[in-house]
Image: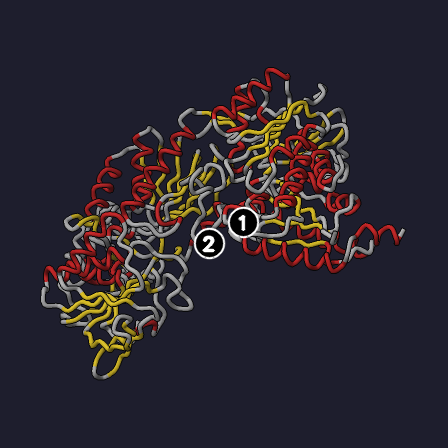
Amino acid sequence: MSFEPKIVVFACNWCTYAALDLAGTSRMKYPANFRVIRVMCSGRIDPQFVLEAFKQGADGVIVAGCHPGDCHYINGNMKTLRRMTMLRKMLEDLGIEKERFRLEWISASEATKWVQVAKEMVEQIKALGPLKSKLEVMV
Amino acid sequence: MSEKPRIGVYICHCGLNIASTVNVKEVVEYAKNLPDVIVSRDYVFMCSTPGQDLIKEDIEKYNLNRIVVAACSPSMHEPTFRAVLENAGLNKYLLEMANIREHCSWVHEDKTIATEKAKDLVRMAVAKARLLEPLKEPEFEVQPNVLVLGGGVAGMRAALELAHWGFNVYLVEKSPTLGGRAALIGWIESKRRGSDIVNAMIKGIAQNPRIHVFTNSELVNLSGFVGNFTARINVNPRYVNEKCTLCGECSLECPIDVVNEYEFGLGRRKAIFIPFKGAYPQTYVIDYRVCVKCGECLKACRYDAIDLNDKPKTLDVKVGAVVIATGYDPYRPFMGEYGYGLHEGIITLFQLERILDPEGPTHGELIIGGKVPKSIAFIMCVGSRNTTPNAKNYCSRMCCTSTIMNAIRIKEKYPDTDIFIIYKDIMTYSSDERLYEEAGKRLIKFIKFEEPPTVSVGPEGLFVNVYEITLQEEIRIPVDAIVLSVGMVPRRDLPDLITVTRVGCGTDGFIREAHLKLRPVEAPASGIFLAGAVTGPKNIIESIKMGSAAAARVTALLSKGRITVEPLTATSDKDICSGCEVCVGVCPYGAISMTEMDGKRIARVEETLCMGCGACVAACPSGAMQQKGFKDSQIMAQVVASLGGV
């Protein structure tokens, strides 16, 4: 069987989770590689969650929330931006390719953007191959 | 909670919505082997009464203490299933939903893949459910006052209804008068004008002691939360008090002359003016944005009604809910769009409404660009339905009807006028269809376009060029006047209001309702309601109805005097907290403060101020701060389960 990447998505309740709902109600189609974890605000997402996901065998992780300036909680997404920028450096040090981690701003009406991000990411990670085998080699 | 989890898993078919893509029976069997699952079942519609009863009976029969429902999005039926738990005597926060419809069956086609994903989603939900804790909803008293933003038909209707139910209403209007755009345009039917309705509403508001009107005012800050908002209102000076007798002497002396926005740019007005005849408050007003305080009006006024020392005021009001009814802007064609601005015979539909108004600039006489036109062409969908590159992609809903209604009115008064309606599609929905029929009987000519027409402005006059699809040829129509049927767009200042009230907007730029069917007239933010064209194009009647609906929703929220809110707040564990204060700076609501406890400085969350974003939890270096319903352990369990672990 061909390689099907496992991708964990952390989505905020108000924008990205709603965009995924909209993709559903609009019957859009996208790859089934994503497992979504809902939080109220992307500002709740602890970088440790992302590290844990990679440790547990995720081939990719998406952190997604409202566009800057549109946060339901004033500026939670700006905190996300800062944290994830730091996390990105750490992932780089760990040898995790940058394509495996994405921070996306997807508003509640941007179901098409989600579908595009989803398709793109699956394609990129398929090209990279599974993460776990690489990590084992590194160890 | 120390007792061992006993989980019931319920998989919904949603008719065929889920069952046609997900093998529900297979998921049921799979769930039976997950840890702590006592019972796993499926049903055709879990949200139906028999479906709900199934869960309730199982809770009693198997002594279940956690419930997982795999069905639609939690935004759809989480409240339904929470109520089931409550009815069965279980804390309603012991429910976890797995979204196997919007996030699975509706977006995937392969049955095997969708079924595997559904199993994963159920496993993740069970993993979180095992760690759920009962939560208590905090209960607050609510302010029996409501802030209504916008003094147009929608806002006034909402204010009147709310006052009727006994609430105090602060009605805040940005312009110097109540009435909104309906006061200037529009006909409800052939004999009833928009202004008739506006005048009746204004009369009701003026007589109602519970409605406090603030014109020339705007909301500049909104703090607090549902039931207990504090709204800061800036009241700009009117400079004219109630001694004004409307004699108009001041206006004659005023040297400042500006475009009259109340005639949609057709005429000009002075800095001291009255917006229109039935304006409320019934006094002249000085436009604080253009007045140079020369004092000429002061000399002219014989009634001591003018005070140029009037200052802007700021006041804070406490309200339980907010109704946003700030309306729309007419689409403004750019210079040269269908010749707009190049010839005085080219006007917009809104300007035509003013021309045909007995109280308008021409006293109801059809005079466009200085003469009575013998022929008029209406061009439809200007600024709407993607007709031009910068047009909006939506239909503005009211323009077909009001164009045809105005064409008929012109034909009634000037039967010899040649009228052409050049349209993309005619959408006179509902009973307005009879207007379309009548227009045909009155020999108004309808010409359908596929490619938008063009307008040529030259020394020989005005021409509309359009490819006529039945004749299959380009035709050139000489006309005396052209009316552009412009649509409705979000107000230019709406983004500021969105920032202040923290509601979201959709792709069109209008404010988005929380859910069109399940939570209409509500903004996604709790305690904020929406009415009228602020959510998208509406006609006068629809706006009024939405005002009533919003008032009914506010009444339902505030009438009990107390409300409960979702307890998804943050709490700090005093034994773990080291008092580093990182959380204090992260909180956007100032809900966290430092306090002394047992000789130790620790963080304390004020539950009434915490909105439950969880930013402080992610920031806390020691894990002392946790968010109810979204604890680190609960999210970590989902992460592990999402990748196959249990």
Q: Is residue B270 visible?
A: no
- In the image, which is nearer the foreground, mark 2 or mark 1? 1
The spot of residue B102 in percent (x, y) is: 55, 43
The spot of residue B492 in percent (x, y) is: 41, 58
Q: Secondary structure at mark 2?
A: helix
The 10 Å Cα crowd at callout 2, few under 14, some 14 to 19, many 20 or more, is: some
Q: Which mark is residue B495?
A: 2
Q: Residue at x 20, y 77 (%)?
A: B478
Q: Residue at x 57, y 56 (%)?
A: A113
Judged from this view, the residue extending furthest toward the bottom is B459
Q: In this figure, which residue is indicated by the disc labeled 1?
A: A23
Quick check: B560 above or below B421? above
Quick check: B19 above or below B329? above
Judged from this view, the residue extending furthest toward the right is A139
Task: Answer left or right for A28 relative to B345.
Answer: right
Task: Name which residue type carries label 1.
Answer: Ala
The spot of residue B18 in percent (x, y) is: 55, 39
Task: Answer left or right for B85 relative to B196.
Answer: right
Which residue is more in the foreground, B314 or B474?
B474
Q: Chain of mark 1?
A: A
Q: Secondary structure at mark 1?
A: helix
Colouring chosen for the image of the structure: secondary structure
Task: Name which residue type carries label 2.
Answer: Pro
Which residue is more in the foreground, B521 or B599?
B521
